[in-house]
Amino acid sequence: MRFPTRRLRRLRKTEKMRSMIRETTLLPSDLVCPVLVQEGIDERVTVKSMPGIQRLPLSDVTGEVESIKGAGIPAIMLFGVPSSKDDAGSSAFDRDGIVQRAVSEVRQAFGDDIVIMSDVCMCQYTSSGHCGIVRDGPGRGGGGSPAIDNDPSLEVLAKIAVSQAESGVDVVSPSAMMDGQVSAIRTALDDSGFSDVLIMPHSAKHRSVFYSPFRDAAECAPQFGDRSTYQMPYTNAREAMQEIESDVEEGADIVMIKPALAYLDLVAEARRRLDLPVAAFSVSGEYALVRAAAAAGYVDGAQIALEMLHSIKRAGADIIVTYFAKDVAGSLLAE
Ligand SMILES: [Zn+2]
């Protein structure tokens, strides 16, 4: 019997040969590091469900950014935990809000030497814990899902984005999954003189249990019902492409898919369809599962994080938001 002429193992013969044919390279410059800043605390608070992740007092933010920059990571994404919540989510667009203050401190300390991204949503700031304005309690969405008033919510999201732009943010990242949020924010930013602020929406953001640890991190769990009337069902890939394409039409500069690991098909499909940068958000649950398994001794946490992040890059993501950013950046530089 004739032995196969094609022997792919020849390509894997030596370390040098393997490095020459490597198709995917992950760099620290591909990563965005989330930063959680909490109003009204003096010391860091450990997030129980996300070992290694802490909520920071404002006074610690510039120091944290210094270490992120030192790891070669070019960007942060700020999430705020306010000390007060109300029905309108008004602490989200307060000029002295926790995110606004953090943005301006980081900008003052580092100038253009760091890309500052910020989450634009209402759920950390509303007493309901929902991402938009709740009309009147539980609605018809099923599962006690409330009726969210889409268009009035757009006005609030636009106000949040403008207030963050005033503080000096580079990129606003609306995550509310309200229809029309990108165009509402683009118009408001342009009208306020912020035509150079980018929008990186959570374009296809799925209703996912992978977010559970973050709700502990940011105290933003819905107080009633769920988010199934606005976040995407994880069963629908074509609908996800429509969400992404409508964000492009509305003026998104970068589109994002969230979560990442269980949605690599969508990352690959978005990459195939679009010439815009594609981002993927590797969420809290992706981080927490690895941490828990590593703590139990079931997997090598560092190695599995690298494998996951490379798979997201390989699927087509240009930008990866990940809680592993600081942990992996050092080993990427050494590669
Ligand atoms: Zn939200």
Image (cartoon, grey):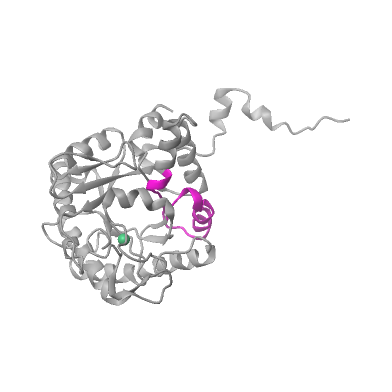
> The C terminus lies in which quarter of the figure?
top left
Q: Residue 168's x, y, as percent?
A: 17, 54
Q: Quadrant of ligand 1?
A: bottom left
Residue 292 visible within the image: yes
Q: Residue 191's x, y, as percent?
A: 20, 71
Q: Nearer the viewer, residue 21 or 266?
A: 266
Residue 279 counted in the magenta span: yes
Q: Nearer the viewer, residue 20 or 151?
A: 151
- Residue 64 shown left or right of residue 314 in the figure: left
Q: Please, which residue is most extreme toward the right here?
A: 1
Q: Residue 329's x, y, as percent?
A: 36, 34
| Vertical comparison of 299 with 192: above or below | above
| Vertical comparison of 84 with 179: above or below | above
- Residue 17 shown left or right of residue 4 in the figure: left
Residue at image point 26% right, 33% down: 70
The part of the chain drawn in magenta is: 258-286
Residue at image point 36% right, 69% down: 250
Residue 333 counted in the magenta span: no
**How many marks do you count on the picture?**
0
| Vertical comparison of 113 with 231: above or below | above
Residue 149 visible within the image: no
Q: Residue 120's x, y, as percent?
A: 27, 60
Residue at image point 29% right, 58% down: 198
Q: Nearer the viewer, residue 181 or 24?
A: 181
> The N terminus lies in which quarter of the figure?
top right
